[in-house]
Image (cartoon, grey):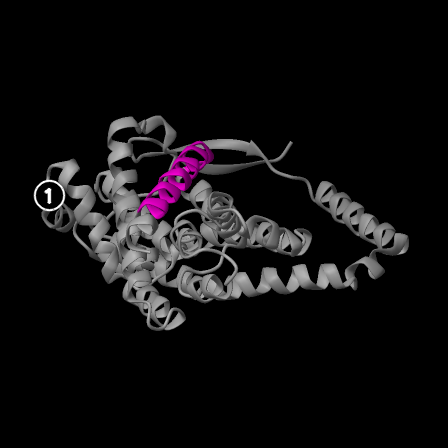
Amino acid sequence: MQVERVDIPGRSGTHAAVDRPAVPASVLAAGAASLLALCGLAWAAGAADWLTHPGFRAWQTICVAITVQALPFLILGTLISGAVNAFVPAHVFSRALPRNPVLAVPVASAAGIVLPGCECASVPVAGSLIRRGVTPAAAFAFLLSAPAVNPIVLASTAVAFPGRPEMVAARLIASLAASAAMGWLWLRLGRSEWLRMPARHTGHQHGHSRWEEFRLGFQHDFLHAGGFLVLGAMAAGAFNVTVPRSWLDTFAGSPWMSVLFLAVLAIVLAVCSEADAFVAASLTGFSPTARLTFMVVGPMVDVKLIALQAGTFGRSFAVRFSATTAVVAIVCSAFVGWWLL
C-alpha cells in the first residue's frame, strides 16, 4: 500500500511527520465516473426542467447577489486580518485596550465605529485579534459592533430614513448596548472549551518574510471563510423563495410579533449591513421599533454570519453565541425603540 508523509502541527508549535495511506488513482477515477453517472441520471429524469424553473432561477439570483454583495467586505476583512497578523506587533493591542477586561469590552465595542466593513469583514478580524492575545470578550464586542455602527452604515441609515435622525441614534445606541452586553456576558459565562479556532501560527516569526506571512494568512482566512459565506447565502436564498409574501402582512399587525418576525427575517435574509437600512425602510407596514430590530439584529446574527462564525470559532461557539446575541439584540432594540421612537 502506498503512503504519503504529511506534517501535523503540534500544540507546542513543532511538527510531527506521520504516514497516511495515499488514495489510489483507480479509486479517484471510479469516484469521478460515479459522479458523472449520477449527473447523467438526474438529467435524464428531468433535472434540466427543474434547473430552468422560475423558483430555482430566483434562488440562484439571490445566492449570487448575497455572495457578490458580501465578497468585497470579506476580502477587506481577510486583508486586515492578514495585515494584523503579519505586521502589527502584539504589544500594540495590549496598550490600546484597558488591562481590565470589564473596561476593555466597551472600548472595543466603541472601536467598531472606525472600521467601514460588514459582518463578513469583522469575523476574520476578530479571530486575528484573539490570536494576537486580545481577550475574547473584547474581540467579540468588536465583532458585533463593527458592522452595525461604522460610518458607512450610519450614513446609509440616515439616507434611508430622511428626516429621522432619531432612527440613526437608536441604531447606534442599541447596537453599542447589545455588543457591550454580549462582551460582558462572555466574561461572565463564556467557556474556553467552546472556542475552537483553526490552528495556525500567529504574529511574525523571526527569519520569515512578513509579506509571505501576510499572503499565507490572507489565503487561509479567505478560503476558510469564503466557503461558509456561500453556504449561508444558499440558506438565505432558500428562505426568500419559499416563504409566502402574505406572511409579512399577517405579522405586521401585532406590535410584539412584528418585532420578533423582523428579527427572524433579518437573520435569514442575510442582507449586508451597508444595505439593510433600505430594506428596513421599505417595510412600511411595520412599526419603527420592529424596523429598528431588523437593523440591529441583522448585522449581528444572520445565516451567513453564523456559518462564518462556525468556520472560524467552531460550531459549539456559533450556536451558543448566535442564539444569545439574537435575544440580547432584540431586547436592546425593543427598549431603545420604546425610549426613542
Where 217 falls versus 306 (above or below)?
below
Whether residue 209 is visible to the viewer of this picture, yes or no, is: no
Whether residue 54 is visible to the viewer of this picture, yes or no, is: yes
Write down the region rendered in magenta. Answer: 314-335
Q: Which residue is mark 1?
A: 98
Please give the name of the residue rendered at 34% of the width and 64% of the height, measured from the top-left corner: 153
Q: Position of residue 6 (x, y in %)?
A: 47, 38
Where 303 falls versus 162 (above or below)?
above
Residue toward you, 133 or 201? 133
Numbered label tally: 1
Left or right? Give the position of 321 relative to 258.
left
Please give the name of the residue rendered at 30% of the width and 44% of the height, measured from the top-left corner: 178
Where 84 falls versus 325 (above or below)?
below
Where 223 falls versus 155 (above or below)?
above
Helix, strand or loop for the magenta stretch, by majority = helix
* Residue 329 magenta-highlighted: yes
Residue toward you, 39 or 160? 160
What amino acid does circle 1 point to?
Answer: Pro
